Image (cartoon, rainbow, N blue to C red):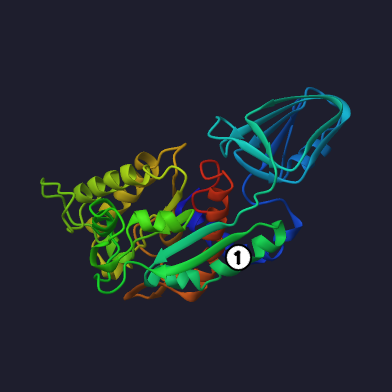
Amino acid sequence: MSMQGDVNRRRYIMATLLALVVALGHGAALAANAKLSEGLSTSYHQSLDAAYTAIANGNSPIIAAQAGTFRGSLDFNRTWDVKLKGGLDANYGSIVGNTIIEGDLTITSGSVEVDAISVTSPAANPVRIIYLHHSTGNNVWYGSVPEFISSYNSSYNTDYQISERAYPNSPYPWENYPYDYWKLWVDTTGETGYQQQDTLDTLAANYDVIVFKHCFPVSDVEANIGAPDVASSRKSLENYQLQYNALKSRLHQFPTKKFIVWTGAALTQGSTTPENAERARQFFSWVRNSWDEKGDNIFVWDFWTLETGGGLYLLPENAASSGDSHPNGTFSAAVAPLIGKRIVAVIEGAGDSGSITGE
């Protein structure tokens, strides 16, 4: 597909997504899907029950389930021998986790061979989510993030409690780049924060999911000077990578918590140089493809790709103006459900099998 075709596809998805969210209560949970293979036939379904119901003749049926959570009980009530394989990635090619069935699994007829499947009761405790942001994240938040989570709770009887906060905030400078998270979360530990900011210890004690991001100046990436320094606020690839690796080690110290980091907000073409924008692209590619690891407690939401359509710059139709790299209201409203979907996927065990853009 051409780059323009890909951009047009993203525009179509964003324009239609809000309409799909309205219909949330009529389908399965967003976190995972299933594939039915029967003989030479293959079909895809939004629930395990739908996949089982679609079995036509019992010709060695295999139901493959993505890692994540499926809600509702499942009754195997026909005389077929079924294989139920769980924990699979988005392409159903490899195991990346576990598939959870919230409900009962009953076998009244036939047999079922299961792999990477867990059966649990619905979660009794709320999941506490903090959404840390500055101005770009604020625009997306008011695009309908809390409304999306509220709608999901109503549709699936979940208790996901999300709140937002400007972080870091005064008296700390209005800066939330890799250096700043290193300074506040890695270099500073314990209960007493640097310049009155909560440490990671404090945030992790109060929340189950921590969403954090960088505003668009992060994408104005300068050339390396051959002297990487984790304690430097200079925006360069060599410093960013040191700071992100230190952050990863620190986040891994909280294995029961889940962290979602956005790829950085992009700049308009007139607000940066081609060289700096290319270095930003390289950094976010590294974050997605090298720094992010499957099977841990850290997940990525690829905001940069949504903003740029895969190019170097914030697309003009997504920007507040040619000289203002904030996302405009239309774009913010289109992507707010995508971060909502990403948060739900991570909570429900599908962070490594679902789309990192939320599409």
The answer to whether residue 268 is visible is yes
How many numbered markers are drawn? Answer: 1
SS at mark 1 in the image? helix
The answer to whether residue 8 is visible is no
Q: Quadrant of residue 144?
A: bottom right
Residue pictured at 35% horizontal, 55% vertical: 200
Residue 90 is situated, as x and y percent measured from the top left of the image, at: 57, 39
For the residue marked with disc 1, what is the amino acid?
Answer: Phe
Farthest residue to the front: give it: 191
Identify whether 220 is placed above or below 288: below
State left or right for residue 321 relative to residue 332.
left
Mark 1 lies on residue? 148
Residue pictured at 30% horizontal, 48% vertical: 247
State the quadrant of the C terminus: bottom right
Residue pictured at 40% horizontal, 45% vertical: 254
Residue 283 is situated, as x and y percent measured from the top left of the image, at: 30, 49
Residue 176 or residue 359, whichever sits in front:
176
Residue 304 is situated, as x and y percent measured from the top left of the image, at: 40, 57
Residue pictured at 32% horizontal, 42% vertical: 249
Q: Quadrant of residue 75?
A: top right
State left or right for residue 347 relative to residue 224.
right
Disc 1 crowd rating (10 Å Cα; few below 14, some 14-19, many 20+) is: many
Residue 27 is situated, as x and y percent measured from the top left of the image, at: 74, 54
Identify whether 139 is placed above or below 233: below
